[in-house]
């Protein structure tokens, strides 16, 4: 496993072979997750749950939960009986 070190001038150099063939001038987004540094190619769409704050995720969930249920027929009572579940 390669070891990376920050130089005296604060530069962290990553050998190109570790970046899976990245081209010169390729840009990466940097995430710090605890003690782990993650480099991700810039410009790729990140899923909402990865980019949103916990507050934004909670607000979005509350909005979704408060939306009206779609019109659908109710399940017959017999389908919810214990005997019917195992048939």
Image: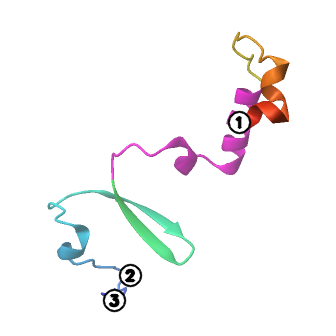
Residue 30 in the image, given as x and y percentages of width and height: 42, 63
Side of 63 where 30 appears, left or right: left
Residue visible at 73% across and 38% down in the picture:
86
Q: Quadrant of residue 57?
A: top right
Residue visible at 64% across and 49% down in the picture:
53
Quick check: 22 above or below 84? below
Neighbourhood count class around disc 2 (C-alpha, 10 Å): few under 14, some 14–19, many 20 upward: few
Side of 8 where 33 appears, left or right: right
Secondary structure at badge 1 equals: helix
CA gap, disc 3 and disc 1: 41 Å
Q: If you read the primary sequence from the N terminus, does the residue marked by circle 3 or circle 1 appear first?
A: 3
Secondary structure at badge 2 equals: loop
Magenta region, residue range: 42-65
**Mainly helix, strand or loop, the magenta region?**
helix
Quick check: 19 above or below 72? below
Q: In which quarter of the image is residue 13?
A: bottom left
Q: Where, quadrant-wise, is the N terminus in this rendering? A: bottom left
Frontmost residue, 23 versus 74 = 74
Identify the residue position indicated by label 3 in the image. 3
Q: Does the magenta stretch include residue 58?
A: yes
Identify the residue position indicated by label 2 in the image. 10
Residue 46 in the image, given as x and y percentages of width and height: 44, 46
């Amino acid at each position: 496993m390669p070891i990376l070190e920050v130089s005296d001038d604060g530069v962290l150099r990553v050998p190109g072979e570790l970046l899976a063939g990245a081209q010169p001038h390729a840009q990466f987004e940097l995430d710090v997750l605890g003690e782990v540094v993650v480099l991700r190619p810039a410009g790729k769409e990140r899923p909402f749950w990865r980019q949103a704050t916990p507050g934004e995720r909670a607000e979005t969930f509350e909005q979704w939960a408060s939306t009206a249920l779609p019109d659908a027929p109710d399940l017959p009572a017999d389908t919810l009986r214990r005997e019917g579940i195992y048939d």
